[in-house]
Image (spheres, rainbow, N blue to C red):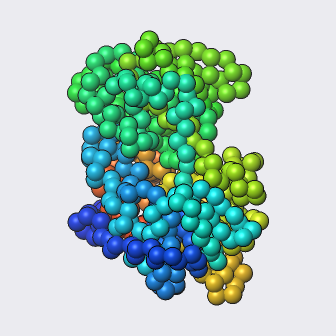
Amino acid sequence: MVVTKCLLFQRAASGLLVKGGPLRNFSLPATAGKSHYKVLVAGGGTGGCSVASRLRDILPAGGVAVIEPHEHHYYQGAWTLVGAGIINLPATRIPMQQAIPDNAEWIHDKVVAFDPPNNKVTTASGRQITYDYLVLCVGLRLRFDLIKGALEALDNDPRVCSNYSAYYVEKTFKAFQNFKTGTAIFTLPHTPIKCAGAPLKVTYLFEDYLAQRGRKNDAKILYFTALKSIFSVPKYAQALREICVKRGIEAFYEHNLVEIDHKNSIAVMQNPTTKETSEYSYDFLHLTPPMTSPDVLTTTPGLTNPGANNYVDVDQGTLRHVKFGNIFSLGDCSSLPTSKTAAAVATQSRVLVDNLTDLLAGGSGTVSKYTGYTSCPLITGYQKGILAEFDYDLNPVETFPIDQSQERALFAWVKRSLLPPLYWNGLIRGIWSGPSKVRKLLRFGLSK
């Protein structure tokens, strides 16, 4: 019965979502000279587009504006697939004008200063814009520069790659193909990062790539994490450790990549606590950069929380700023203590808009509460994966009525075939709030 229900879900989702490309309308052009909006969204990424879309039926056209400097919107969660040669990079992007919903004006500019006491932002072009409510979702800053020699290696060494940047992700599969024999190194840094499972995903995919070609013994695969555990949730950590042992992947804990000497093929690791360093030779190196809050946030007094890595200081239940009551934040730049994923944003955006809508109607802004739900579809090979879902307390919150810590072809299908169209046609359109309803359906209503 369980298998039958899962197969029915797979077939139904496939028919509803996989056919066709992103279904988008075009954003409104910014009104010349307009300097005030009811809701101003800083950032046109996953969180910004989802929130703006959800406000479609709440505020009139032109009542919402999204400030975003980039020309394209990327589904970054699919870059793991790009790095493994499963899809190409253009398949992960659409023009920003199509990503931002048709009820919102797109201000093609960059915020360079926030002034919360005066409800004002300043853009790179010198424009000053005021707001009644501000939603902050400007993402993270990739800090390749914090690893000595990393940028030089990425620019000059074809063996060094990273799935975390549109500039470098296409190097990864080329490095897969060009690898002959030797040591392959994969890293996870000491800072919070978006999609913390991605460094493991590329590790497993590299091993599977070689295994499928009968070359399993050609590589010594080393996985270095700056953390004390391979994954934050014990149930999934155990499964992931077992996969490493089974496939001959050697995992090192409390090893943070601090330097790359690409001319001598050396990666330098440092223990975050003792500061002791060690050197390893590499023939392939996939690095995950440290990530930090954007400077425009950290330089604004009272906006971020130094105790939470200088992310926007919001209440973890309501997503409302703890000091400035007309500011909300979600996604990567928020201080919410959960894994930074698109799956988290799906639920966060619903909670945020519920509470914002209540404020607009004169309420307290506390009608909805976020419990930390997030998900990491850990693809562990080209045709297998596990599906980690959990909350603030690191308790599994699994959708399927089967053990999601076990490798299954279903979960690889979810990652490869279900999530991309769900992202384009559901999440950033503001109509996907996470799998809670699906979970209740598959579990006969007996779930959170």
Q: Residue at x 71, y 66 (%)?
A: 116
Is any part of residue 252 visible from this angle? no
* Rendering quarter of residue 145: top right
Query: Residue 342 location, x and y as percent?
Result: 48, 57
Q: Quadrant of residue 143?
A: top right
Residue closer to the observer: 254 or 192: 192
Where is residue 367? Give x, y as percent. 66, 79
Percent position of residue 119, x then y? 68, 71
Horizontal placement of 48 versus 120: left or right? Answer: left
Residue visible at 40% across and 76% down? 28
In this rendering, is residue 421 above or below 276? below
Res 297 visible:
yes
Front position in the image: 2 or 203: 203
- Image quarter where the N terminus lies is bottom left
Q: Is residue 113 left or right of residue 117?
A: left
Specify whether 79 is left or right of 359. Answer: left
Residue drawn 38% across the image and 62% down it: 96
Residue sitting nearer the eye, 390 or 339: 339
In the depicted structure, whether residue 316 falls above or below residue 175: below
x, y percentage for residue 190? 61, 35
Up the image or down, 285 lies above or below 68; here it is above
Q: Residue furthest top?
A: 264
Q: What residue is drawn where x is 30% and y is 47%?
A: 89
